[in-house]
Every structure is written in structure tokens, then in C-alpha cells.
Image: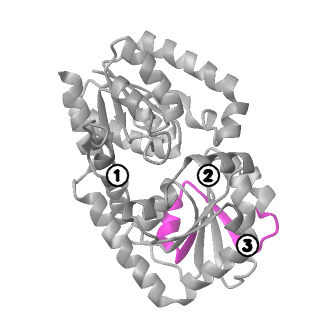
Amino acid sequence: MKYYIIAGEASGDLHGSNLIKELQQLDSGADIRCWGGDKMQATGATLVKHYKDLAFMGFAEVIKNLPAILKNIKFCKNDISSFHPDVIIFIDYPGFNLRIAKWARKRNFKTVFYISPQVWAWKESRVQSIKRDIDKMIVILPFEKDFYKKWNYEVEYVGHPLVEVIEKFKRDHSEIQIVANTIALLPGSRKQEITTKLPLMLAATKNFPGYQFVVAKAPSIEDEFYGNFIGDYANVKMVTNDTYSLLMKSVAALVTSGTATLETALFGVPEIVCYKASNISYQIAKRLIKLKFICLVNLIMNREVVKELIQNDLTPKKITVELNRILSDPGKKERMQEDYAQLKKLLSESGNASKNAAESIYIFTKK
């Protein structure tokens, strides 16, 4: 069968690649065309567009890049029409994917959404268009099933794909040991967010001369870009395509909000969540989003497990205070580890999420 998959960021590339591998196990004749990244391309799927050319973050940034976005939407529609897949699989990336879904549904393409848009955070009204345009919704967060139920929309919960990804990595790299003075810096995968957050993280490193800070570099961004920020920081270095090994070695981490916060928790690393956007984007989001937390770890657990430093609270001074607490308070670290264990249990009760999702999609598409 022919599958067309659209992912628009690094996490979507990761989950999309594992979904593709499972689909290929089920369907030896699978012909897969995708929008994503290096990981999806490495499976043998035909990569149409790389996510690094698609990732625009925040309200102001989207408006600024609207011509490019509209051009990509037109190209995508034409590409789907030419390929004529048996099913279109959307992975998160809602601003783009829901536009394509509306168009696709009118042309009788089968539509599946894997990894729900975060409509529970804001724009709940999007559920109406999801119900209209998405034939099958597959969710990976336990509270999403109840959220959609109140909208009278039946969805399928398959567990979170990161659990199996990280457990496999741990098994395959069991030789990696914690290095007592290593602290990970995960400033994001887009230039916009790195520019905003990394300088503040780096400024705090001056207060920890006995520690080695390691920046997890996004593979799609050139070394020179990071070099402009890191400069002469003697206790800071970079790694590329090695974030998971870095987390296995680290005693703590400063992490930009998003999937990385969950990855860090599943590796059992005490973390501080660092979030800062442009003032315009933040002020708009603040009025629209009514969640108690921004971090996935806290949202899933429905309480503060990890500290969130948001917008004006994200300062070198406050980073230093919170990082000192993690490094010097064994009780705090122990409580966080216990919470992480509960989190993992919640996300793994359904088994291998990628395999579950692939089986569900394969059976649905064959009908």
C-alpha cells in the first residue's frame, strides 16, 4: 500500500521513523513518501521536504513566514495528488496538517492523525474540524482519551513511543555510565528558540566552575551558529547526534519545553524546564492557553514534578538557584526519581506504541 506521512519537526521525525519501521514489518510492499527529517529518510522512505525548512515557531514568526507556509501547502497538495496514497498520516504539526486534512477529506483520501495536536491546551474548537476531517485519531498521552470523549469523539490510545525508544537505547548502550560533573543543556532544535534560551543557560554555567556543561546540538543547525554563543566558556562543549548518550551521562539538565522534557525524565535525569518566547508570542499565548503547566512531565502527572522557569522567570540567577537545589539536595532528586517512575508506568501500560499505532493504521487502511 501507499502511505503519505507528514511530520514538521524533530520529534515528529523520530516518531515517524519508528512508525515507518513498524509499517514496513507489516506491509512488505509499503511505498512511503514523507515530510520529515533524516531519521525518516534513513528508513528508506522518500523524503519530500525536510522539517528544518518548515519549522516556524510562535505567532509572530508564523505571520512573518506566511508566504513560505502557503507555498508549502500548495506544493504538498499537488504532491499528494500525484502520489495518490491509500492513506495520509499526519504527525502533530497541526497548523499545517489540519489544512491538508481538510483538503484531503474532500477528495476522499483516508486520513489518520498520529500524535494529537495539543487542542487540550488551546484552540479546543479545532476538535470540530478534527472530527470532520480525520477518520482516525491515535493519541499518545493518557489524558487525551478522556479529553476527546467529552467531545463525543472516539480515539485510540497506544501509549507513548518514547518509552520503547529510550528503553531500547539504554539496553543497547548499557556501558555508558553517569559522569558526576556532567550537566546537559538542551536549548531546542530551532534557531529562534536557541537564540532566546541558550545565552541564559550559558550565563548560569559561570556559577558552576566544577561542572562540565554539554550542549546537545540540533543536527540540522551548523556548528558556527552555536559557536557565536558558546565563545570562550571554558566549561562548555557541544555534541551532535548524541543527545541520548549525553543524558545517560548527566547528573542534571536544563531543557527547553517540549518533547525533550519527557525524554529527559524517561532517562531519569533531574531537570529544569526553560521556556522563553518573543514578547508578542508569549503575550498572545498567555491569553489563549489556560493550562497550569507547559511541561509534558507536569501535564501528564497533573502536578509540579519539575521546576518550570517561564519567560521573565528564566534568568541566570533563577537557573542557578534551581540547579543548586538539584545538585545539593538528595531528597529532591529522590522524589523526582520516584515521580519519573510513576510517569513511565503511566506511559507504558499499553506496550510498544509505535507497533500499536502501525497495526492500527495498517488494519484501518486495508478496510
- The image quadrant that residue 256 belongs to is bottom right
| Label whose residue precedes the other's in the sequence (1 or 2) | 1
- The tag on residue 339 is none
Looking at the image, how many numbered discs can be counted on the residues? 3
What is the distance, in whole Å, between disc 1 and disc 2 at their CAs? 23 Å
48 above or below 235? above
Q: Amino acid at mark 1?
A: Leu
Instruction: List x then y, in percent, for residue 158.
Output: 26, 47
Q: Quadrant of the N terminus?
A: top left
Residue found 54% across the figure and 82% down from its top: 326
In-image side of 338 versus 214 (left or right): left
Number of residues whose C-alpha sits closer than 10 Å to that of mark 3, classed few (under 14), some (14–19) or many (20 or more)? some
Residue 6 seen in this snapshot: yes
User: Residue beneath label 2, please?
Assistant: 286
| Label whose residue precedes the other's in the sequence (3 or 1) | 1
> Element at badge 3?
helix
Instruction: List x then y, in percent, for residue 81.
Output: 44, 11
User: Residue beneath label 1, please?
Assistant: 141
User: Viewer-nearest of labels 2 and 3?
Assistant: 2
Q: Which residues are magenta?
A: 230-253
Q: Amino acid at mark 2?
A: Lys
Residue found 70% across the figure and 38% down from its top: 61
Residue found 54% across the figure and 49% down from its top: 289
| Label whose residue precedes the other's in the sequence (2 or 3) | 2
